[in-house]
Amino acid sequence: MGGRELLPSHVQTFLSVDFYNHDSKHTDLTEGFEPVYNTLFSFKNTVDDFYMKFLEKDTILVDIFSVPPKTADNSRTPNALKVGSAKLPLHKLLEKDFSF
């Protein structure tokens, strides 16, 4: 940031979610040090043996991206930078009490 103070409005992020055989879904761009991604995704699937095995053994991939702040001339570098990932296990969805 060139030695300047980092303001919450300069920290802009979004999440990307990859699930099963669907296209990636993205949250809206959110700013701040403690972003809240208030997004609901739904995926329509046929529940068959293959899908159930996927839920038992696989994960949902969530990546977090940072978007560079706008420059002095009000332009923005178009590339987002991946800053982290998480693989969330799906087998918990199959448990009766849904306790996470």
Image (cartoon, rainbow, N blue to C red):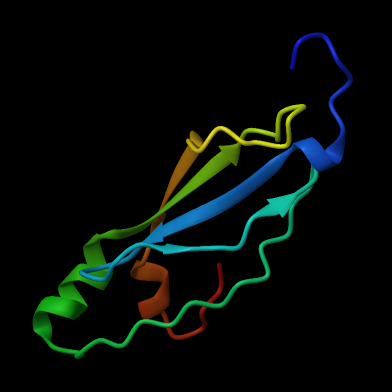
Specify the quadrant of the image occupied by residue 30: bottom right
46 or 82, which lies in front? 82
Q: Nearer the viewer, residue 68 or 96?
A: 68
User: Toward the viewer: 76 or 65?
Assistant: 76
Which quarter of the rendering shows the N terminus? top right
For image coordinates 63% across by 46% down, the residue present is: 13
Q: Position of residue 88 (x, y in %)?
A: 42, 56
Image coordinates for residue 97, horizontal then vertical, percent: 51, 83
Where 66 sits versus 16, above or below?
above
Q: Residue at x 66, y 62 (%)?
A: 37
- Image quadrant where one finds the C terminus: bottom right
* Left or right, 3 with reference to 17: right
Height in image: 31 above or below 56? Answer: above
The residue at 23%/62% (across/down) is 57
85 to the left or right of 33: left
Residue at the (42%, 60%) spot, across then down: 17
